Amino acid sequence: MNTRLLWTAFVTIVVKEIRRFTRIWVQTLLPPAITMTLYFIIFGNLIGSRIGDMGGFDYMEYIVPGLIMMSVITNSYGNVVSSFFGTKFQRNIEELLVSPVPNWVILAGYVIGGASRGLGVGFIVTLLSLFFTDLQIHHLFVTIAVVLLTAILFALGGFINAVYAKTFDDIAIVPTFILTPLTYLGGVFYSIQLLPGFWQGVSQLNPILYMVNSFRYGILGVSDINIGFAFAMIIGFIVLLGGYAMHLLNTGKGIRE
Amino acid sequence: MTTALSIQDLRKVYGNSFEALKGITLDVQQGDFFALLGPNGAGKSTTLGIVSSLVNKTSGKVKVFGYDLDTQLAQAKQCLGVVPQEFNFNPFEKVLDIVVTQAGYYGIPRKQATERAETYLRKLGLWDKRNERARMLSGGMKRRLMIARALVHEPKLLILDEPTAGVDIELRRSMWDFLTEINAAGTTIILTTHYLEEAESLCRNIAIIDHGSIIQDTSMKALLQKLDTETFILDLKDDFTELPELNGYVIRPRDAHTLEVDVPKSQGLNELFKFLAEQGMEVTSMRNKANRLEELFVSLVDKNLKQERA
Ligand SMILES: Nc1ncnc2c1ncn2[C@@H]1O[C@H](COP(=O)(O)OP(=O)(O)OP(=O)(O)O)[C@@H](O)[C@H]1O
Ligand SMILES: [Mg+2]
């Protein structure tokens, strides 16, 4: 297929993915909006006013970037894992497999489709946060780059999860037992400086910490970690997971007999 | 003449033990209307699955219009339209969206895709349903939806795995007309079916596959010529008193006024009718006992079974 045909195929997949999550917005867009509003009210306003400063900012300001990032991560992952698993489950993956769309375009389409939901929800949560705090972005480029790359990374993760998944349980395990704990412990709600030395070290093994902190750095200008290192790590993970996802697609794991 | 599909020594082992295809070789010429027949579990869907790259082959070669699936997969796929045995669209999507999206996968821009989708949905009588979710369609409509979806990129080779399963008689006939029409317009068609009457009336060439091997690969005409006797059922106006006997024919009673006659190809029917007329027996109607192809099919598969046991 030449570039123009590939582009049409790519856009077709992305549009189909975006239509899917907007069609079921009550399941996809509304819940994070409600949950995050509750977080803002309870943690930010009610409890936050008693906590005082965190990293030199008032608590609400401190957690907003973390909560936006948390929404982006959960929704990018969640979109691809359920959409691609559903496609496998209903067998309409075959529509793609019989067509000449190359595997990398299939992967790119699903990943960008999933990242779109992550970014869409992130945007909604950002708008909601404006009811509670003023957002001033310190480093626009860092903010945008880190949120984009994170969305892509977790969309890739969701894709790999979907390839391996055989039942609906399999698509819930990773988000519940790995993603959520890592996100909560990834500095969304606190600065790791509050932790004793040992636990600070352990926290630094959590990749999500780097994403949340880079994003917070983009907005507030403060970070617990080195931003250059964070970017290198995110890109490294994208290359790794992207390569692995391509390998799975090329061997037909979970999709071809 | 171009070969639309060429399969060489194709093998498939499922889960490294069950050998579903034991090395089949098959050619289908461009413009053909080809039937791939065989009992349940023979390996028809497996073969078509490999051709449409939904199933990985174990070994062998497959070429679609000369494009090797191993080295020129994208070109091969571009030539191919697939209607699978099982429904495989997203039941929550709208009919029109399903067809337009499929066109997009072949790189057809949206505007043109929508026009094509309209053409084929209209031809298949689904245009009124275009805004329904696919799961709201009846079984026969779902099949037609899959046909429209398979044609939207105007493939040179159309593969249909039991397209008329669960489709009522009237609709089946209109589907036959439609397939005959696109075949006449140049599309090569391969279909599998368990309705042998369908294969007989549509297809020019035929292969029979059984237990993963091809046991017959010939033209419909040549195959039917192999049938040396045909059984007819004759309804008589009056009850007969005595079973008529005629040299060269085997005549059996079915009930008091119905006869079953085995007629050898070499004898024909004239002599039989002349004889019955002489006996004063008036025939009110006559029909084939079974479809001709059906008789052959059963005998071939039986023979294969006996050989396998031996
Ligand atoms: N995914 C699979 N795993 C293991 N065995 C399979 C699989 N798919 C098919 N088979 C086996 O391979 C054989 C051929 O199956 P296939 O579906 O090709 O038959 P078929 O000729 O299409 O039959 P039918 O007329 O019932 O559709 C069968 O014995 C079947 O049980
Ligand atoms: Mg089958």
Image: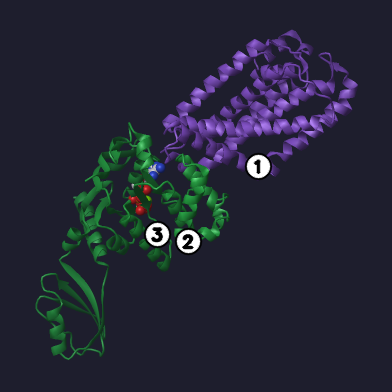
Give the residue displayed 70% in from the left and 25% down from the top. A69
Are the residues under marks 3 and 2 on the same chain?
A: yes
Hue used for the chain lettered B: green
Residue B261 visible (yes or no): yes
Q: Amino acid at mark 2?
A: Gly
Residue A153 is situated, as x and y percent measured from the top left of the image, at 59, 24
Which residue has dot 3 on it?
B164
Of the pair B190 and B16, the residue shown nearer to us: B190
Which residue has dot 2 on it?
B125
Task: Tell me the distance, in whole angstroms, between the alpha carbons under discs 2 and 1.
Answer: 30 Å
Q: Is residue B76 above or below residue B128?
A: above
Residue A168 visible (yes or no): no
Which residue has dot 1 on it?
A22
- Indicate the secondary structure of the residue bearing disc 2: loop
Q: Amino acid at mark 3?
A: Thr
Say which quadrant the C terminus of chain A sits in.
top left
Q: Is residue B269 above or below residue A31?
A: below
When asked about the image quadrant of residue A138, the answer is top right
Q: Amino acid at mark 1?
A: Thr
Left or right relative to B198: residue B296: left
| In this rendering, the label closer to the viewer, 3 or 1 | 1
- Indicate the secondary structure of the residue bearing disc 1: helix
Left or right relative to B36: residue A142: right
Hue used for the chain lettered A: purple
